[in-house]
Image (spheres, grey):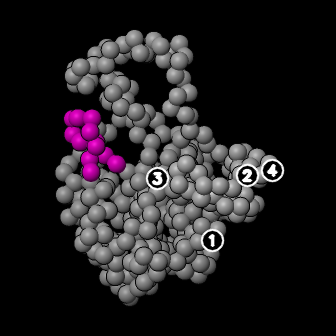
Amino acid sequence: MKASLQTKLGNIYHANSLDYMQYLPNETVNLIMTSPPFGLVRKKDYGNVDAHEYLDWFKPFAEQFHRILASNGSLVIDIGGAWLAGQPTRSLYHYELLIMLCKEFGFHLAQDFFWWNPAKLPTPAEWVNIRRIRVKDAINCVWWLSKTPWPKASNRRVLIPYSDAMKGLLKNGYDAKLRPSGHDISDKFSSNNGAAIPPNLIAIANTESNSPYLKKCKEKGIKPHPARFPIDLPEMFIRMLTDEGDMVLDPFGGSCVTGEAAERLNRKWACVELEEDYIEGAKLRFPVQHIVKKTNNYTISHPASLWGSELDILSNEEQLPADGGKTRRPITK
C-alpha cells in the first residue's frame, strides 16, 4: 500500500484501516494508540444513537487489533462519553465497548485512565448552562488494554514533580506507622526518589491555538481536524509503553498527532486515515519540530471551596426542581 507521506520512521496512509491492517503480520505492532471516531454515537451534545450500532461497527477493528498486537503490547483508546437523546443521562456505550473488548476479544484492562481537560467549556449547554442540573463534562475515558496481564511498561518514564506537601514531608520527615485506613506506611515512603509516580487522572488542557499545525493549516487554507487530542496524551503512553524502535499504530489517524509524537520519540509509526482532507493537514506536522515544553500544573478546587460563602447561602435558598429540571425555567445566574 502506497503511503501519502513517508518519513524516516513512519508513514501516513489514506485508506480504510481494516484494509491496511489485513496486510500486517501477526504480533508486529507494539502499541495501538488511538481515539476512535465518536460520529456513530454523537449526533449532538445531548443526543446519540443506540450504543449497539457502535459496538457492531467496532468489532472487526477489535479482531484485527488483537491479531496484530505484540504479545506484550498495548492498546490505548481515548474515548469520549455521550448523552442519551433528549434527556440528561449518559450513554454506556464506551463502557460496553470496554467490556466487549475484554469479554469477547480476550483483552485485559491493564488500567483505566481519565483525561481531564481543564479548558473544556461547560457542556452540554442544555443541561449545564440552561437547566443547571448537571456539571460540565470535562473527562474522557482512556482504556489501557493488553493481550497479557503483563504488558511491558514502566512508570519511571512518566514521573511528575513532587507536590509541595510531599516536599515538606521529605524535608521534615514522616512518622512511619500503620494508618487508620489499614495501610502500613514504612520508612521507605519518605525516600526522595527525585519525582513522583503520576495518578491515573491525566490533566492536559486541549488548547493549541498557536500550534505549528494550526498555523500551517491556516497558511495553506486547509481545514484542521476538528477533534484532535493534545500531543502530550499519546506521548505519555508512547513513553510508558514502548522502547525506541518499537512500532506505534493509529488506525484512526485524523491529523496524525500520534505519528508526530512517535517521530519525536524515535519510534516507528503508521497513521491510517480515511478522509483525504485530514491527511493534507497531517502532512504539515512533518518534519517534526522538537519543541521545548512549557509545563502547566493545574489545580482542582475542593468541593467545599465555596461552602458557607455568600454565593453558597444564596444558592441554598433556592428549592431544587421537583421534576429534576424536566421543565425549562428562566435562566438565572
Residue 37 or residue 163, whichever sits in front: 163
Of callouts 2 and 1, the N-terminal one = 2
Q: Name the amino acid, label 2.
A: Tyr
User: Depth-wise, is mark 2 or mark 1 nearer the camera?
Assistant: 2
Residue indicated by mark 1 = 265
Residue indicated by mark 4 = 171
User: Depth-wise, is mark 4 or mark 2 nearer the camera?
Assistant: 2
The residue furthest right is 171
In the picture, the disc for residue 100 is none
Residue 38 or residue 189, whichever sits in front: 189
Q: CA distance from mark 2 to mark 1?
A: 38 Å
User: Is residue 180 shown in magenta?
Assistant: no
User: Depth-wise, is mark 1 or mark 4 nearer the camera?
Assistant: 4
Q: Residues within 10 Å of mark 3 (few under 14, many from 20)?
A: some
The residue furthest bottom is 25
Residue 191 is left or right of residue 233, and the answer is: right
Whether tag 1 and tag 4 are in contact, CB under 8 A, the answer is no
Q: Name the amino acid, label 3.
A: Phe
Q: CA distance from mark 1 to mark 4?
A: 35 Å
Q: Secondary structure at mark 2?
A: loop
**146 is higher (above) or lower (below) than 184:** below
Q: Name the amino acid, label 4.
A: Lys
Q: CA distance from mark 3 to mark 2?
A: 30 Å
Q: Secondary structure at mark 3?
A: strand
Residue indicated by mark 3 = 114
User: Depth-wise, is mark 3 or mark 1 nearer the camera?
Assistant: 3
The quadrant of the image that shows the N terminus is bottom left
In the picture, the disc for residue 174 is 2
Q: Residues within 10 Å of mark 2 (few under 14, many from 20)?
A: some
Q: CA distance from mark 3 to mark 1?
A: 23 Å
**305 is higher (above) or lower (below) than 267:** above
